[in-house]
Image (cartoon, grey):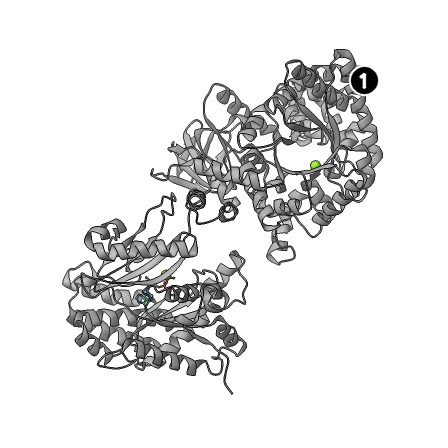
Amino acid sequence: MSSKKYVYLFEEGRADMKNLLGGKGANLAEMTNIGLPVPPGMIITTEACKEFYVNDRRFPPGMEEQVREKIRVLEEKTGKRFGDPANPLLVSVRSGAPVSMPGMMDTVLNLGLNDETVEGLGRAADRRFAFDCYRRFLNMFGDVVLGIEHAKFERILERYKERRGVALDQELPAEDLEQVVAEYRALIERETGQPFPQDPMEQLFMAIYAVFNSWNNDRAIVYRRINKIPDDLGTAVNIQVMVFGNLGDDCGTGVAFTRDPATGARELYGEYLINAQGEDVVAGIRTPRPISDLKVEMPAVYQQFASICERLEKHYRNMQDIEFTIERSRLYILQTRTGKRTAQAAVKIAVDMVHEGLISKEEAIMRVEPAQLDQLLHRRIDPRGSVKVIAKGLPASPGAASGKVVFDADEAEVLGNQGEKVILVRTETTPDDIHGIVAAQGVLTSRGGMTSHAAVVARGMGKPCVCGCEAIRIDYEAGEFRVNDLVVKKEDVISIDGSTGQVILGEVPLIDPELSPEFLELLQWADEIRTLGVRANADTPEDAAKARAFGAEGIGLTRTEHMFMAPDRLPIVQDMILATTTQERQDALDKLLPMQQGDFYGILKAMEGLPVTIRLLDPPLHEFLPNAEELAVEITRLRLTGGDEEELRKKEELLKKVRVLAEFNPMLGHRGCRLGITFPEVYAMQARAIFQATVQLVKEGVKVFPEVEIPLVGEVRELALLRQLVDEVAEQVMKETGVEFEYSVGTMIEIPRAALLADEIAREADFFSFGTNDLTQTTFGFSRDDAEGKFLHEYVEKKILPENPFIVLDQAGVGKLMKMCVALGRQTKPDLVIGICGEHGGEPSSIEFCHRIGLNYVSCSPFRVPIARLAAAQARVKNC
Ligand code: ADP
Ligand code: MG
Ligand code: MG
């Protein structure tokens, strides 16, 4: 019975056989077939590895025979023989999974050497060289295959170098290397209880066994888990005839990228070492030289290499990362793969390749990872400077900033208004600190995770934030924080990097986000391709302008509550809430009206010609009042110290009201449209502010499209009632001013009931916008803060949920509701405009889902607009 084919010669494979031959093997095969100088070799398939595990870690039947057969082919091709003392064949054994996996087995070079063949190799080439190869082989085999600590080999070698007083391996003479080899062999025998295996075939099978085994070593398993690589792919084994870069000064080894992986510039970028083997280049023993030197040193080889690089790039139509070795002035290519690159390089290379006619615009769009663009959209620390990192927290909101340390939001605001740069440092932040965050360059907290208040707010504002930095201990009283013995005082300058979580002492040089011409061009192509609109969430005219500059086609969500939080407003808002008579309430609202009108004027003006969705007040009222416990403490203090009677009475009143407004479950409590139903005068004031701002702008000749949004609707009659209120205000304003204007009224879909009854709700709505944060909370019955703080990570770890559904849209559940809602809504109104706002609107896989279910637009934070534009284009390309 003939067995399955487990072993392929390089010439039998192709680039598209990655699953069977692994990435490295498939590319070696491809390069062989297009005629590049690749040393001959064979590949043992991933299939064999899989069967190895099915068979209790035994080689599948027939595999060994196939390996022996192919070794005979390699012998014929090279005229050398495995184990031949006169002219030995040596090979490398390398692992190679279908996807690149750094956790796997290290390569073994020079396999086939033993006490006899080393002599033969010495006679054929050079004795010093032969023993250099042998000691490398013993070390690699001992470490990688037999599991003997590398340091033990290293110590022996060090001893010889010390004795000679030399720094470099290659300065050791042949006699020393011979002794090193003898000591290595003794070490192996001591450690394993067996003499070092002299039979090359036995060495080979031991190495193959080790490669298969390494698929399930701890490093590999962890790497696969982190990178979501399936456990059942298996690894291939590459066995390749050795070529030698360590035969003298006409030899060398190196790696090169076909373009600069940092900038994307179209020039060879790499390093090489003369008279060196394999990993010497990356090992950092000697300083390698830039590839451009090779042009001078070995012009012919350089020319050949440059033209091969060009050929490989054309062939793969992508930037390549290439390993090469020069043996006695002959060039060999040992590996090629798609080169890793920075975001900046990814963008430049994709765009350049379109101009070079190598790839299409659609391919260019697909070549850039949207999430990677984040790197390009924030200020960051100049990587050329040197910095003193004092602590590390969670990288909660990308970008870097420097400023004076302040511990208090009010102080941050005062200094900020004076034009000072400040970093707000708190144990954690609350809504009371918003004005401080607004005024600060960035936020540092010692507690709280990636979804803490500070993190969410900072991300929304596009400000750098490092949170959960437990190493810093804040002492508000003393006005300082400590990291170990270091004391940082108020107004000392620090820097934070929200992309890495680093906290740095002193000011650091920052560089601006690079919206390079290539980046702009790529986004322009994205706009040509995509059909999904991209809007932004913005609460201020500045954010709106920023969003517009990044390409937003409207505002998908303006939250009005932030406007109520501003320090000049909060007291008035509190008066409104605490009012005991309608008149008192109206007085407060009358004061708020011009302020809100100013807010809306600014945002609508910044978005001239584009739609702006303005959501009426959403959070429960007690969020605008002080904390009950703090208030109680203060009242007690006033009582004890016999403070001002009047003040005491006021505080007691306030506390009573705070307690009345307290809710068992605020998320499901008196908020959203429920506020509008019970306090219609609040919504009426907001509607009036929107429409009066609109009239102002219409009079100035500015085209505006306000969209009034009612939050948290679950029943059509809620919307009908509030829509009527808004329409009445609009009519009044038109009558009072004699100015006609366009506007629309719609609702957020954030309660499952609204999605279920979308056909009814659509009767009263001009538009829908999915508020997927609340919709996720209400669909799962999770409160986000509790879920993320307590159990969600375990759900993800135990694979109950594939991802955090607050970050990546739950397409199965929440998505099903959305799909149903779109269908029902458009059944009533075929042209109903439907969008999504909230974090999911800036997350690429969620954006693709929105494209597929036919939404009109996604809306995300201003800084994510370019990411969303690209992701929307990718969604179109993938789902054409
Ligand atoms: P890695 O994945 O770490 O790059 P490789 O399997 O590519 O590991 O090999 C490690 C080093 O050994 C590389 O520098 C490679 O070029 C070199 N090497 C591998 N096979 C051979 C060979 N047959 N002849 C000479 N050098 C080789
Ligand atoms: Mg390699
Ligand atoms: Mg909501």
Mark 1 — residue?
582
Q: Is mark 1 within 8 Å of ligand 3?
A: no
Residue 124 position by quadrant:
bottom left
Ligand 2 visible in quadrant: bottom left
Q: Residue furthest right?
A: 717
Residue 41 position by quadrant:
bottom left
Relative to 292, 667 lies left or right: right
Q: How many discs appear?
A: 1
Q: Where in the figure is residue 707, as x and y percent of width and height?
A: 71, 28
Relative to 30, 589 lies left or right: right
Q: Residue at x 21, y 54 (%)?
A: 299
Q: Residue furthest bottom?
A: 1
Residue 739 higher or lower than 488, as above or below: above
Seen from the viewer's position, the closer of residues 459 and 25 is 25
Seen from the viewer's position, the closer of residues 786 and 8 is 8
Q: Is residue 657 visible?
A: yes
Q: Is residue 626 visible?
A: no
Q: Residue furthest front?
A: 357
Residue 295 higher or lower than 222, as above or below: above
Q: Where in the figure is residue 354, as x and y percent of width and height?
A: 45, 45
Q: Residue at x 42, y 75 (%)?
A: 209
Q: Where in the figure is residue 256, as x and y percent of width and height?
A: 33, 54
Relative to 325, 372 lies left or right: right
Seen from the viewer's position, the closer of residues 656 and 781 is 781
- Label 1 environment density (alpha carbons within 10 Å; few <14, some 14–19, many ≥20): few
Relative to 48, 91 lies left or right: left
